[in-house]
Image: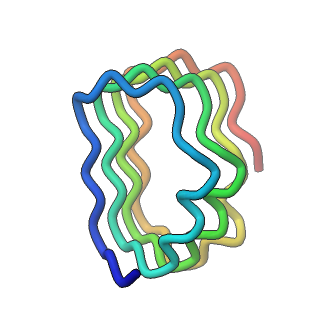
Amino acid sequence: MDLQTLELHQNRLLTLTEQISSLRQLLRLTLTGNALRILPQSIVALSSLQLLECRRNNLICLNSFEFMNNLTYIDAGENKLIEVKK
């Protein structure tokens, strides 16, 4: 699938499936205003991702994004972060 933008804001999502990694061409992912506590580890497989918006969730940890070379913008404000992994 060649989906480039996925906007899932304000949906009361509690989880995001590991299969998100199958969207290899995804450039923009908006998850703002849900109830997510964690992002799946498989999100690092989104190597084309440039923008990740996950503001206003219940995130407690952000995984490492070191292999996501195209990622230039992350908005993770208004969460409950206690750890950001390198």
Q: How is the image coloured?
A: rainbow
Q: Residue at x 40, y 73 (%)?
A: 26
Taking the image as shown, residue 49 lies to the left or right of residue 18, namely left
| Number of numbered discs | 0
| 47 in relation to 18, above or below | below
Q: Quadrant of the N terminus?
A: bottom left
| 64 in relation to 60, above or below | below
Q: Residue 69: x percent and y percent?
A: 59, 77
Q: Residue at x 33, y 64 (%)?
A: 28
Q: Residue at x 37, y 62 (%)?
A: 51
Q: Residue at x 67, y 19 (%)?
A: 82
Residue 43 figure quarter:
bottom right
| 29 in relation to 14, above or below | below
Q: Residue 68: x percent and y percent?
A: 61, 71
Q: Nearer the viewer, residue 70 or 15?
A: 15
Taking the image as shown, residue 85 lies to the left or right of residue 1, namely right
Q: Residue 36: x percent and y percent?
A: 49, 26
Q: Residue furthest right?
A: 86
Q: Residue 7: x percent and y percent?
A: 25, 51
Q: Nearer the viewer, residue 16 or 29?
A: 16
Residue 32 figure quarter:
top left
| 36 in relation to 49, above or below | above
Taking the image as shown, residue 13 lies to the left or right of residue 86, namely left
